[in-house]
Amino acid sequence: MLPVEPILTTLTTGARQASSPRIALWVIRGPLSARRYWAFAITGLLFPIAAWWLASTAGWMDKVFLPSPQDVVIRIATWLTQGNLQRDIWVSTYRVTAGWLLSALLALPLGLFIGTYRPIQALLEPLMDFIRYMPAVAFIPLVMIWIGIDESSKIAIIFIGTFFQMVLMMAEDVRRVPMQQIEAAQTMGATRDEVMFRVVFQSAKPALLDTLRVTMGWAWTYLVVAELVAANSGLGYAILKAQRFLQTDKIFAGILLIGAIGLAMDQSFRWLHRRSFPWLYSR
Amino acid sequence: MAKCIATAGLGKIFSTAEGSTVALESIDLAVDASEFVTLVGASGCGKSTLLRIIAGLDQKSHGQVSIAGAPIDGPDVDRAVVFQHYSLYPWLTVVQNIKFSRQLAIHRRDITSADVEAAAGRAEALLEVMGLTHVANAYPNQLSGGMQQRVAIARALLPRPQILLMDEPFGALDAQTRDVMHDLIRYLSAIENTTVVFVTHDVEEAIYLGNRVVVMAPRPGRVDSIHGVPLPDERTQDMKLSPDFIALKRTILERIRETSGMKTDYDTLRKLTQHAAWIT
C-alpha cells in the first residue's frame, strides 16, 4: 500500500493541474490564450462603464455633472441624426491625420540622420529637446498671426504638438540598431547609402512603425487644442461648444468618440505591424 | 595568391573619462598569404581589438597596418568578418542573409549571368555543408544560436574572401558542431587559399586550426610568444591526442596562465577558506 500512495498523489495532482490551468495565470511573463486575453480586456473596458452607470443612475450626482451612459448614447444618436456627427468625425480625423502625416514625412529623414551621424545629432537634438518642452497651446496666437484661421492653422498646431517628440523618438529607434548589423554590411563592401537603406532603415522599421502608432495617439490629444483656433466643426470644437451650454452628455460623447477612433487606429497599426514584420511574430 | 597582413609598431589607446588604457602596444605581426593564424590570450589582451583594426572597424592609435603593402582605410570586401554574435539580419530569411552581399553595388558591377549562377550554386552548397537546407526559408530568430552562427559563417564565405577574420565564432556552438566547423573551415581555407586570422580563448581550438598560434598578454595588450604548430596541413581529430599537440597545449596554457594575473596556486587558494569562518 505504501509505495502506491505517492504515485497516486502525483497522478491526481497532475490531473488537477491539467484540468485547471488557473495556476499558470500568474507565471511571470507567462503566456495567455487569446480567449483569456479578450476576457480580461473586456472586463477592463466594461468595469469602468459599469461603475459609471451605477454612479450616475443611483442619483448620487447631479445629471449636469455626471450624465448616465444612456444619456450619452442618446446624445450620440441625436448628434448623428439631427446634427452633423459624420462631418465632425471626418473633419477631425482629417486634421489629426494631416498634422501627423506632415510630422512623419519630416521626422523620418531627420530621425534617420540624427540617429546615424553624431554631428547632426549634436546640431539638432538639443534644439529639439528645447522646443518640445514648449506647450503647443502657447503657439496658438502665433499660429493665428502667421498662418491665419483656416484649416492649415489647425493642422499646424497638431504638427507642433507631435513633430518634435516624433523626431527624437525616431532618432532613438535608429540608434538602437545593433552596431554588429552595420559592421557586417561594411565588411561585405556596402557603401554608406547601402548601410543606411539596406540595414539601418530596414532594421529600425518595426520600431519606427511603433513610434508612428504612439505619436498618432498624441496627435489626437492635441485635437481639442487645435480646434480652439476659430473652428466651427470637429469633435474638439463640439466639446468646447457643449461646455458653453453645460451639455455634459455631449462632452462625454465627444471624448468617448475620440477614444473609440483612437483605439480603432491603434489596432489598425498593430495589425499592420503584424502584417509587415512577420519575422517578429514567427517563433 | 592571396594578400598578406602586416603590422608594425601598432598601438591602440582607449580614452575614457577615468583616463586612457593601452589596449595594444607595439604589435609587430606578419601573416603570410594563405596562412591560418590563431590569436589566443587571457581576456583583456586585445586580441579582438587587433582583429577589429585589421578588419578596418576600429582605428589604430599609432603604427602601421597594411594588406598586401597597402595601408588599411576602413572595412572592405577583401576582408570578410565573422562576428561573435548578433550580426544576422532578422528581417531576412536564412538564404537571403547568406546572399545579402549579392545585393550590394560592389558585387553587381560587371556581373555576368555565369557569376549569378556560380553564386547561387555556392549559396546552395554552403547551405548543404552547414546543414541549413531544411531551414533555408526560416528567419534567424527561429534558429538556435549555433545554427545562427553557421548562417553568419556561410554569409561571410559566399563571396570567396581572400582574408577571413573570425572573432570567437564558435564560442556559442556545442562541442560536436564545433569539431565539424573546424574541419570545414580548415578545408575551405586550404582549397581557396584564404588567409585566416582567428581569435579564440580555446587553446585546443587555436592549435588544431592554426599554422601558427600567437599568444597575447594583457596590460598592455602585446604579443607574448608565437608558436609554430608541428602538425601536417591535413588535420584529423585524433591529432588532438598526439604528444606534440599535448606538449604545445601545455606550453601555451602555461604562457597564458603566467600572463593572466590570476593565481590558482595552493597558497593563494588557501587564503579563500582561511578567513571564511563567518559563512557558517
Image (spheres, helix red, strand yellow):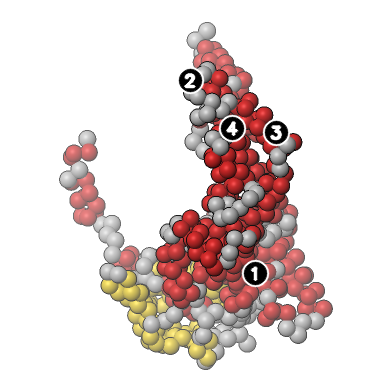
**Marks 1 and 3 belong to one chain:** yes
First in sequence: mark 4 vs mark 3: 3
Q: Say what amino acid the circle numbered 2 marks.
A: Trp
- Which of pointers 1 and 2 indicates the residue nearer the eye? 2
Mark 4 to mark 1 CA distance (whole Å): 52 Å
The answer to whether marks 4 and 1 mark residues whose Cβ atoms lie closer than 8 Å is no
Question: Which residue is disc 4 drawn over?
Answer: A249
First in sequence: mark 2 vs mark 4: 2
Question: Looking at the rendering, which quadrant does residue B181 occupy?
Answer: bottom right
First in sequence: mark 1 vs mark 3: 3
Question: Which residue is disc 3 drawn over?
Answer: A78
The answer to whether marks 1 and 2 mark residues whose Cβ atoms lie closer than 8 Å is no
Question: Looking at the rendering, which quadrant does residue A254 occupy?
Answer: top right
- On the rendered image, what quadrant is the C terminus of chain B found in? top left
Q: Say what amino acid the circle numbered 3 marks.
A: Thr
The answer to whether marks 3 and 2 mark residues whose Cβ atoms lie closer than 8 Å is no
Mark 2 to mark 4 CA distance (whole Å): 17 Å
Q: Say what amino acid the circle numbered 4 marks.
A: Asp
Mark 1 to mark 3 CA distance (whole Å): 53 Å
Residue closest to the eye, A132 or A83: A83
Residue closest to the eye, A122 or A204: A122
Q: Secondary structure at mark 3?
A: helix
Measuring 46% from the left and 66% from the top, which residue is drawn there?
A128
Mark 3 to mark 2 CA distance (whole Å): 26 Å
- On the rendered image, what quadrant is the N terminus of chain B found in? bottom right
